[in-house]
Amino acid sequence: MPTGEQLLAETEQLKKALERRPIVDMARGVLMAAWSCTAEEGWQILVHVSQHSNTKVHEVAKALIATTQNEPLPAHIEEHLPAALARWRASRDE
């Protein structure tokens, strides 16, 4: 049985996830509009970039959304986005 402290920590994690979800959903929408991918494929692209750039998914999402306001992608994210898109394209061609 979880302790009170563990339950509080879990509650805090869930709150953060709920706060960040709209940002991630917007980034998926950006990918869907730009690359004609599905929401799930957009999620997989974000996850790939996150894992390979050692950046939290919501941080990748925020950076991607910022590009719609003519902000450049941070180098560590921009470095991994082409590989994620190439991987997605290859999986579509299978």
Image (cartoon, rainbow, N blue to C red):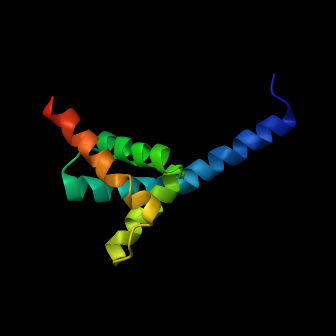
Q: Residue at x 29, y 55 (%)?
A: 31
Measuring from the top left, give residue 68's x and y in whole percent. 32, 71
- Foreground residue among 15 and 62: 62
Position above or below: 28 against 44: below
Q: Quadrant of residue 75?
A: bottom left
Residue occupying the far right of the picture: 4
Position above or below: 87 against 63: above
Residue occupying the far left of the picture: 93
Residue occupying the far top of the picture: 1
**Quarter of the image containing the C terminus?**
top left
- Foreground residue among 52 and 44: 52
- Foreground residue among 59 and 7: 59
Q: Is residue 11 left or right of residue 57?
A: right
Q: Residue at x 38, y 73 (%)?
A: 72
Q: Residue at x 22, y 59 (%)?
A: 34
Measuring from the top left, give residue 43's x and y in whole percent. 37, 44
Position above or below: 37 against 75: above
Q: Is residue 74 left or right of residue 14?
A: left
Numbered disc total = 0
**Quarter of the image containing the N terminus?**
top right
Q: Residue at x 38, y 60 (%)?
A: 78
Measuring from the top left, give residue 62's x and y in whole percent. 46, 63
